[in-house]
Amino acid sequence: MTIDVTPTEDAEARLAALVELSRRARALADAVVLTDVPESEVTAVAAELAALTERLGALRRESPRSFELGPGGVPRNVGNAVTGSANPHALPLVVRVTPERTVRAELSFRPVHAGPPASVHGGVSAMILDHLLGEAVAAAGFPGVTGTLTLRYRRPVPYGEPLVATAEYTRSEGRKTWAEGRIALPDGTALAEASGLFVTPAGWLGRGAGDETGSKSGQAPVRER
Ligand SMILES: CCCCCCCCCCCCCC(=O)SCCNC(=O)CCNC(=O)[C@H](O)C(C)(C)COP(=O)(O)OP(=O)(O)OC[C@H]1O[C@@H](n2cnc3c(N)ncnc32)[C@H](O)[C@@H]1OP(=O)(O)O
């Protein structure tokens, strides 16, 4: 996991434009799933969208933006499907690390995330929890990829309402690290709970937190084992 972009001022202005484009694309997606306009209008809008898609596709990257250093050397991943401000698929989830090194995000799902009537698709909740557990193991110094993820859906997860997602590291053994998390109502009532096992790929080891070739160059800081 190596960060390869040092942004310039121009790059930041361009990113701001992409973030706004993504925000509008999210609003468009919600408008699509909720629209009740006549078929002729739907067909006309679809034609306009085809033209817009062609304009954006005039110059294409091979893949979405990945890890990079933002202003002040802060790592970010603007193309990420869960947190990426420049990815229309993302909520985007804003994850904060607490002083205790647990992680927390305030979120609100949208109509585009619907699964069963009036509630969020279970796979969408799983995606959010997968990411949050991954952030929790990274915050504890044991970054890794998901090996297994287990969910318990306790109550339907609503969209359009403020919710809180939290996760914490629980233990580590060799390259394996476990974490737990949940999506809850603001009063703490758990709606979906997850536990997961993350594996640190062998190639990520050997870089200590804060060393010259480690976090400063964007290599995920990995704790000694
Ligand atoms: C600056 C940056 C900061 C970054 C922070 C941002 C956070 C972002 C958060 C993002 C979050 C989003 C996250 C995502 O979306 S990650 C995307 C979803 N996950 C993947 O794509 C993972 C794909 N799988 C692999 O790459 C490999 O299979 C891995 C790396 C997992 C293991 O291949 P490797 O060759 O390394 O493994 P090994 O055979 O030497 O085994 C090693 C040990 O591990 C145990 N094991 C292995 N696999 C599993 C398994 N599936 N369940 C249970 N256990 C498993 C195994 O038994 C053995 O244990 P032991 O026998 O030693 O006891």
Image (cartoon, rainbow, N blue to C red):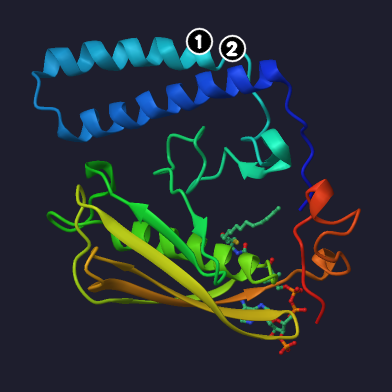
- What is the x, y in percent for residue 178? 57, 81
Can residue 211 be seen by looking at this rendering? Answer: yes
> In terms of image quarters, where does ligand 1 lie?
bottom right
Nearer to me, 221 or 151 = 221
Q: Which element carries disc 2, helix, strand or loop? A: loop
In the displayed structure image, the side of residue 155 where residue 147 appears, left or right:
right
Q: Amino acid at mark 1?
A: Arg
The percent coordinates of residue 173 (x first, y second) are 70, 88
Q: Quadrant of residue 49?
A: top left
Q: Are marks 1 and 2 in contact (CB under 8 Å)?
A: yes
* Residue type (three-letter) at the residue carrying disc 2: Ala
Q: Residue at x 68, y 33 (%)?
A: 71
Label ID, residue 130:
none
Question: Is 17 on the left-hand or right-hand side of 182?
Answer: right
According to the picture, the residue beneath numbered tag 2 turns out to be 58
Give coordinates of residue 144: x percent, y percent: 67, 67
Disc 1 designates what residue?
A: 55
**Residue at image location 51% in from the left, 64% down from the top:** 98
Residue 145 visible in this rendered orientation of the protein: no
Determine whether 180 is above or below 203 in the image.
below
